[in-house]
Amino acid sequence: MSEETARVGERRHRETKQGWRRFIQNLKRSTIEQGRIFVRSKMAVAGLAIIVFYILMALLAPYIVPYAPYERLYMADGSWASLQPPTAAHPLGTTDSAHDVLSQLLLGSRIAMFVGLLGAFMVAIIGTTFGIVAGYYGGWVDEVIMRVVDVLYGLPFIPFVIVLVTVLGASVWNIILGIALLYWLSTARVIRSEVLTLRERPYVEAAQAAGASDFRIMGVHILPNVIPLSALYAAIAVGYSIVAQASIAFLGFGDPTIPSWGVMLQRAFVTQAFGTAWWWVIPPGLSITLVVTGAYLVGRGYEEVVNPQLQEK
Amino acid sequence: MVLSLFTVITILFFLFRMVPGGPMAAITSPRMNEAARQAVIEDYGLNEPLWKQYLLYMWNVVQLNFGQSFYYGESVRSLVADRFLNTMSLMVTAFLISYTVGTYLGAQLGWIRGTTKERVGMLIVLIIRSTPVFWTGMIVLYLFSFQLDLFPLGGMRGMQATYSTTTQKFLSTDFLYHLALPVFTLCTFYVGLPLLLMRNNLLEVLSEDYIDTARAKGLTDRRILLKHAARNAILPVVTAFAIAIGFAVGGQVLIETVYSWPGLGREMVKASLRSDYPVAQGAFTLLSVIVITMNFVADLMYSYLDPRVRLEGS
Amino acid sequence: MKQASAEFDFDADAPLLDVTDVEVVYETSVGDLTAVDHISFSVDENEIFGLVGESGCGKSTVAQAVLGLLPSNGRVNKGSIKYRGVEMTELEKRELDALRWEHLSLISQGAMNALNPVHRISSQIIEAIQAHRDVPTDEARERAAELFETVGLDPERMDDYPHQFSGGMKQRAYIAMSLALDPDLIIADEPTTALDVIVQDQILKRLKELRDELDISVIIISHDISVIAETCNRLGVMYSGKLMEYGDLRDIFANPYNPYTLGMQNAFPTLRGDQSDLISIPGSPPDIADLPDGCRFLARCPFATEECGQEHPPLQEVAEDHYSACYHHDRIDTMRTEAERRSTWNRVQDDGTAVGVEGADD
């Protein structure tokens, strides 16, 4: 190996270390500092608290539910304990089918967290991948991807998922599929814009000159720099995914055998019981609202950490 | 725009062939007798190769022929046309109101940045945006209809109402009475995007040099806000409008369900639940067309509003 | 649309603009930062005054402070800014608005963005006019056309949008707009920075002509000393929020008294026609959040001594209409000679330690 090649190789090795090494270095060094900045924002902390609370709920639910979600409950005289307002025995009352609302709520958090986190994860992955590829390659690759994005924007989300569920069956997985197919569009667009500027950075040009493969450049130099942006959009996607699943379930396309907040609200609506049974309607809806708010606050808090100019005086 | 339409319709073609029961089930109702079934199979060329079916399908679509509803027995086209107006009356009204109110509030919030009022305002906006719209609908109905009995429980018109013309139908007080709650609920759902967008844009615009120029000229705050800041900040709100439509339609579907509003969305939901595939397909197609058209309109509006784009040629 | 213009009690004997002991402070997350530290200068009728200094020295802040255009976290903490005897820092917004553009107007840097892109240029000029005077639109349009001619632009293009003009044309349009109400004082903040040299030259010439034709005064703020040298008759040299040298421009250039000025002259081509090599001042200005004791220029001054480390020197009169802030005016002849040598400036260390002058009394 000539000295020249060795030098180039060494430089290449050094450069490929930069992106991720810097990222990990930053991660290690500033996690504490970032944590401190994060904690400064009361909102972000509140958001985090909410999310943690519901994650705990989801994890512990099977162990702490007082009743099975679809267990029929009876009054003292043997009749159904239907539409009972909150009491000590049933802190959130019962549904029209004499099921315990609290149990349903607790178990419903599992689906919510599952869909939320999985949906967000996929949106982040798919959106970021397409965004980086489109932004980095430019040319016809970019054109094609952006065309696809444009066309897909023409598909209204909920009707599309309805069709998907009609065709493929009512299961959580199909709803997640719908989310994966359509929610990544905005993320991809934003990541792509970011990549367009990143592409011109000196270390990218240096890596290109040193002969690094496209894949390596995208993965090692560009990716670490867009992760904060992806994370923000992922946080927002958590909220959207949860609401999407709840909405689809509400319309009657959810799996009725799995207790989810959407299904709870669907039953409450279809039986017209929501006109009086506030204990049935408010907890699931409130939970959805809280989780979505919390996820957004966490995302926003993280954004402030990464983007110091956003911090309030 | 044409490309989008074309692609979407093609996607639909393939999607609906995948319903349980195959393409046959998509166009023949289980209630049909054998003769009718054969007739339809002939019509749609289900015995022909795929590409022929596709061409037939496209031909039908262009003629706005979506077949007959399994459930109602009438042509999908007339059904969908009827529901279309109902949907638009609700959606457009809500859109107009929420975009007007949203941009106004957004500008105000942007102008008072840093104050406690602004922080509180933003938190309220966040919470409203996080609330699932159908739940808001239920709560609103619960409060204003069930409990306070101020508004009807849903539907588009009362039992006793009769009309002779369509215009009369849409302008009557009975209609407006029924419109109130759904529009209110939809507005809470729609208002978030223009509000936040306008606020963000305003903040960006306020740091531009020409705002300093305006202040140096000694103009009143109000004039600076309206003629200079807002005028520039509103441009991206218009484009975002396009992105919002896709999700706005979803909200529309949910609200129509909650309020039993006889629109396209509700029809599609019911049709899907009933396996009335022709109606589902027709309704979805039309909803898609609405979204794509609105996107296109938004593009046009943007190029009109921004002289830099408009006068590209000069 | 016309605003109520307040009646002002102008003092006929007072200078046009009198800035005394002004301190401007910015509130930031790291505390209060002083961007302008007790600056005093005055501008009279029919004068072009230049404010020169490196980026970040606070000269733009001075302009903003005068016009009341400081960002929301900035404020004039101390001092007075008087326009014809009227104390501007005490005016209500309404009164300040009445003064603005009528008496003091602004040409800001980056005319690129100083004109609103969605409005026609004519309407922006007319807006300026009608905000202060009860003038019907057609009359305002005539005036706008007049102004266009004054700055050498074709009045036919008055109704164009800003993006249809080139950089130089935009700047001229801006100047036209600033003249709309016949102001007495124009503050030009880096008026030619974004323009190429030829256009720059034209604009500066025009500004000088306008001073004579229209009897206005101009404050030109620039980091480019050659721009200042070409147009101004009086000058203030700013560094890190302080005024280092101030007074009649020709006298300052012929007989500079301040080491910073000496350094600056070296860094710009052919100011006096006899420099062939450019010598730049090593180092950079101090961090405004962490100001050192003593003279602000200490770390980069090849002539600094221990005495300079106690307090920043006050402005002293060294000749008629010529002030400088330095403790070593007595050594000025030596300093002038030494400043011309590159080796002098190489003595400045990066770690900011003061480097003594050979043969100086310590």
Image (spheres, rainbow, N blue to C red):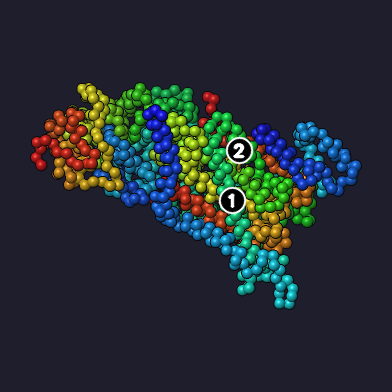
Q: Residue at x 23, y 29 (%)?
A: C279
> What residue is shown with label 2?
A149
Judge whether B26 appears above or below B153 on screen.
Answer: above
- Image quadrant occupied by the N terminus of chain A: top left
Name which quarter of the figure residue C114 lies in: top left
In the rendered image, the residue lying farthest to the bottom is A77
Q: CA distance from mark 1 to mark 2?
A: 21 Å
Work out whether mark 1 precedes mark 2 in sequence or the reverse, and give the earlier one.
Answer: 1
State the image coordinates of residue C163 (x, y, percent, origin top left): 47, 29
Q: Amino acid at mark 2?
A: Val
Task: Give the residue drawn at x 79%, y 32%.
Answer: B52
Q: Nearer the viewer, residue C318 or C127?
A: C318
The image quadrant that residue A156 belongs to is: top right
| Up/down of B146 relative to C146, above or below | below
The chain under label 2 reads: A
Residue A16 at x, y percent in the picture: 44, 38
Say which mark, if any, is on residue A118: 1
SS at circle 1: helix
